[in-house]
Image (cartoon, rainbow, N blue to C red):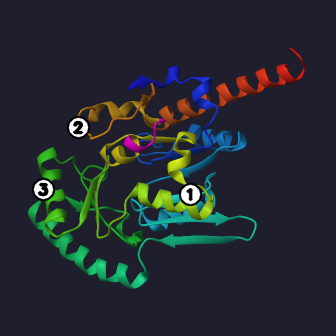
Amino acid sequence: MKPFAEFSISETYPIRYVLTDIDDTLTLNGRLPSEVFVAMEKLQAAGMAVIPITGRPAGWCDHIARMWPVDGVVGENGAFYFRYDGGSRKMMRRYWKPKKERHADRKRLDAIQRQVLKSVPGSRVASDQAYREADLAIDFCEDVAPLTPEEIDRIVACFIKAGAQAKISSIHVNGWFGDYDKLAMTRLLFEEVFSENLDAIKDQVIYAGDSPNDAPMFGYFPNSVGVDNVKKFTGKMPHDPAWVTEREGGLGFAEMADRLIWMLHGLDQRFDKLLQGG
């Protein structure tokens, strides 16, 4: 991983989209610093689309799509994307699975929930579970005493044994039934909302994250960035980010945004001088 302070103008110039995880990437100690909101607003003002890609629930994502300075949000690890049109005051909700299938999946996830809580004492259903539509989130350190890596692996094993997918974030194990993930739904969002083939423009995207469930995105996007706290997972993920910030969490995201904007501003100034014959 290279220091993001070395990210150059030539690499900045094509960036049109900023994708980002939320927990421990935009947040710091469980809170969203004011610098993060300002950074997202500045990125939009500079002409970049901002899109959170998160494991957080549908209820939260409805709020995020409406209230945050973002251009859409992928939630529940790829179960859907939401996009709010401020002009028409309408929310676009696009799910990977139809409602009937999601309801059937819920019964199977309820059985996994019972097995996890029985098999792994100290685990708990995530406090945001009531607002989820497609997955099951098991808390291992957000609102409970931190579990050991071995206990977290046992939670994952319960999902896998039942035929579900399971991903470990910085705070939860999320499990679901379906062949989707963050990247699959991101591809769909780009195709349906931005009329873009993600494979063709991935060098125009930056992805910021912090933990193992971001590894597929780190591996896919050449301009992947880990905030400083990603270092504790170095060597434990199939893909590390290409770049790393000096600061952790949301402060690292703001550091990344400031450098992008600063370099774009410098490039604009150079272009203006060329137009003026300087």
| Nearest the eye: 103 or 59 | 103
Residue type at mark 2: give it: Lys
Q: Quadrant of residue 139?
A: bottom left
Quadrant in the picture for the N terminus: top left
Horizontally, residue 232 falls left or right of residue 183, namely left
- Magenta stretch, main secondary structure, is loop
Q: Quadrant of the C terminus?
A: top right
Dot 1 or dot 2: first in sequence order is 1
Disc 1 vs disc 3: Cβ atoms closer than 8 Å? no
Was residue 229 drawn as part of the magenta stretch in this picture?
A: no
- In the rendered structure, which segment of residues is drawn in magenta? 219-223
Rendered position, 205 above or below 228? below
- Amino acid type at image mark 3: Arg
Q: Residues within 10 Å of mark 1 (few under 14, many from 20)?
A: some
Where does residue 36 sit, x and y in percent of width and height? 56, 40
Q: Earlier in the sequence, mark 1 or mark 3?
A: 3
Alpha carbon of mark 1 to alpha carbon of mark 2: how far? 30 Å
Residue that carries the numbered disc 2 in the rendered image? 236
Residue toward you, 11 or 166: 11
Give the residue pinned by disc 1: 190
Residue 119 appearing in the image: yes
Residue hosting label 3: 154
The image position of residue 205, as x and y in percent, is: 54, 42
Real-space Cα separation, disc 1 to disc 3, in angstroms? 35 Å
Above or below, comparing residue 169 to residue 98 in the picture: above
Where disc 3 sits, the SS reads helix
Q: Earlier in the sequence, mark 2 or mark 3?
A: 3
Q: Is residue 37 rendered to the left or right of residue 217? A: right
Q: Which residue occupies 49% across, 35% down?
A: 223
From the image, state whether disc 1 or disc 2 is nearer to you: 1
Please state if 216 lies on the left or on the right of 116 as rendered. right
Can residue 64 be spotted in the picture?
Answer: no
